[in-house]
Amino acid sequence: MSAIFIKTAGLGPHAFVAVALSKRALSAYRLSFGAAALAAAINSVFGLLVAWVLVRYDFAGKRVVSALVDLPFALPTAVAGIALTALYAPTGWIGAWLPVKVAFEPLGVVVALTFIGLPFVVRTIEPVLADLGTDVEEAAASLGAGRAQTVVRVVLPAILPALATGFALAFARGVGEYGSVIFIAGNLPYRSEIAPLLIVQQLEQYNYRGATAIAATMLAASFAVLLAINLLQAWDRRKMAA
Amino acid sequence: MTGSASTSEPRWLRFVLITIALAFLAVNLALPLAAVFAGALAKGLAVYRSAIVEPDARAAMRLTLTVAAIAVPLNIVFGLTASWAVTKFDFPGKSLLISLIDLPLSVSPVVSGLIYVLLFGLQGWAGPWLRDHDIRIVFAVPGIVLATTFVTFPFVARELIPLMLEQGRSDEEAARSLGASGWQTFVRVTLPNIRWGLLYGVLLCNARAMGEFGAVSVVSGHIRGLTNTLPLHIEILYNEYNYVAAFAVASLLAGLALVTLVAKSLLEWRFGDSIAGGGH
Amino acid sequence: MTVSVTGLTKRFSDHTALDGVGLDVRPAEFLALLGPSGSGKTTLLRIIGGLDFPDAGTVTFAGENVAGRPARDRRVGFVFQNYALFRHMRVADNIAFGLTVKPRRERPDARTIAARVDELLALVQLPGLGRRYPAQLSGGQRQRVALARALAVDPSVLLLDEPFGALDAKVRNDLRRWLRGVHETMGLTSIFVTHDQDEALDLADRVAVMNAGRIEQVDTPDAVYNRPATAFVADFIGNACRFDARLAGGGVDVAGVRLSNSGPACADGPGVAFVRPHEFAILPAGAPGLAATVRRVAHTGSRAGVECVLADGRIVDVSAPLDVAAGMGDAVTLVPTTVRAYPA
């Protein structure tokens, strides 16, 4: 890991800026971080819903559904990539029905990262939701709160730290994701090219320094996210742990 | 767990929520999985079969199995050692070690691969020495094994650490007080306590080892028949517009994913308590 | 306010939790629901509170049927076994919760709410702790916050599920006295569930003893202890020794000794008899009664505990005056002085 930073340090500030902060690199970061954030946001909403349904309701096939949630953990990213591309291509099962083009566009990146990130959110929220128990909700009801008030004022705040952690995990994974994205993204410079792909391209041209510079920038960003997660959890523990 | 009468939503709302959740999962997860098998069988079974038995595909399969056969046992050893050290002893730098264990999960796999190129590549630190001794790591099988091992390192340890923390040290202390040696304590007390959690971690580790793409892509050099794993082979076929063959090979990995999921669910169902502490 | 239930039946998938329960709780009464675990006491409390709904039967508050009304519309204060405090809210916000969720028209303004919270914090003897989080409080303090939260909405009934269950013995005793005091100040109809008979007998105006989904007896602590209505109550309350017996002509034969029956009148036939530790006389061996051997004598406090072994191997604890003339290994005869017998 330190090799990355040492190599980067050997680059000199001008060369570093020229590669890591080039216009093309900046638009790649923008896409990687932006799409990852959007996908993590989508997953926060649906992941919360899925976790809620899995923890709170009984329905036929629940065990199968629960197993399916882990599919993105188990399915190789390249497989996911070509499958999503086939689905969202203009002639695909889903693409044919959509009014906008998804595959080979930035939107395709969001689709792939939504696929990848879902289990991070669901599996982070699930245990907290199960642990929350129904007695606090009963307490709220006996104090006169309606169901909506109970959910908004009692349930959501209690799982908010888990939701934020799930968001951050999905986001961090999305920023670095490569395999599932490159097939569906179209990889047009300045438009649908993600940062990890830029690293691979630099490597293919044997420009190790350029690759390293971009990697260092991404690593710094990943560490920042990790730090945020840890601070968030520490803050939450300090406040609420017994 | 289902809520009592006073804390459950009305039946219609429950139905709506379940429907939305299932629809999302169907579109986002089930459809892509179905698309793999549909794509693989698009031109019939014969084409599917020939795509799988084709020599390059078989070479890729062999390499993937080889890599997993090295990386997974290595990570069982590393994972056990790390979790044992972290949960049964106190030592300086322990919290740093715990953070380091998770590192490969939060770093882009492409960056992970890049690290090995920087260390062992021709222009890398160890590059000249390796070249002089005629050892190839990058763009060769050892590099693929190293990168895969790095990327899959957290899975075993992450499964075991919470489990072993929860179980505490008292069993081990009891065994030691009865005169068991460190090794006897580990084999006869610790290991039986964590075996299902270990299996669970191994399953996830294996799935990732066989499916890793980004890191392996960077270090492999994509030499057909030599340094191509199954996921890389899929990419090559796909980029050659040989979609049916790409999906056929992909269906093998998708099948592996399904087996992993089924085994994982069975473990959770049968031994839920002894693999608790999970979460990813 | 009077709380009445009649014919309450509640079945869960695998067992019947309540089997035709009827109970009247008087205004301002402090009533204990006492029974072993699984006897249905918590289910009964939850149905009164509107957290569960019965399969059959009625629940009335001051004559008004509320059986179909959910918890939020019942104006009950419910204190949960593990307090169910909102962990993410400060103590003051926990207490204010019931007021802040009222419909806008009925909701007091912020200052009124703050004043009410301070008042309640003073009542539960936690002034100045409003800004803490529940995790920063001790078990006893959390318990009192839970009570303050329940009282904030001016409930007409206070329901407490094992209010002292999660506390250690010392705290438990202090809180018991204090809760009784609060009850007397507020004058609320209060019902609490417990499996601890000391707690029920010490605290309640009346005790309802439950067993297997039915109420066996509702009476004052004294009556429940000294005049148990059924064999279950006699066995469950206090520490009683059980014997097979014969009921005949208003009396009872236990181990060949004929005694008068202090239990309720019942028909002749086979029966069971219960004798409490202090209701034995220890006589020299050979007298008519239960032959026994003294195994241990412990002089603790104001009475002596004499552990005796009967001929059939059963162990009987006898509570005797400190000057009891029995030593370890002595052969003695135990004669019950008071016997409560019930048909078998």
Image (cartoon, coloured by chain):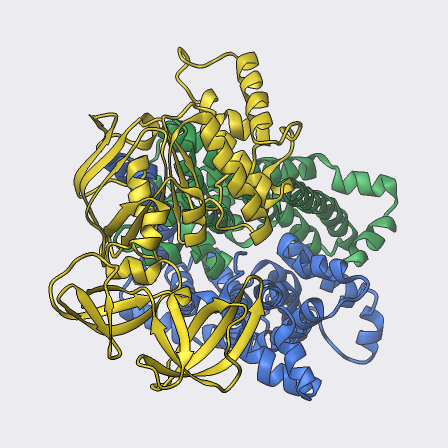
Chain colours: A green, B blue, C yellow
Q: Residue at x 28, y 62 (%)?
A: B43
Residue A199 appears left or right of A100: right
Q: Residue at x 67, y 27 (%)?
A: C128
| C146 to C185, vertically: above or below | below
Residue A227 appears left or right of B49: right
Where is residue C198 drawn, in percent x and y? 45, 52
Q: Residue at x 71, y 73 (%)?
A: B137
Q: How many marks?
A: 0
Q: Residue at x 70, y 67 (%)?
A: B86
Rendered-image quadrant of the N terminus of chain A: bottom right
Residue C260 appears left or right of A88: left
Where residue A192 sits, quadrant-wise, is top right
Q: Nearer the viewer, residue C88 or A15?
A: C88
Where is residue C72 drawn, in percent x and y? 34, 28
- Residue A160 can be seen, yes or no: no
Q: Nearer the viewer, residue C191 or A166?
A: C191
Where residue B223 sits, quadrant-wise, is bottom right
Where is residue B107 drawn, in percent x and y? 66, 53
Where is residue A218 drawn, in percent x and y? 70, 45
- Residue A73 can be seen, yes or no: yes
Q: Nearer the viewer, residue A41 or B117?
A: A41
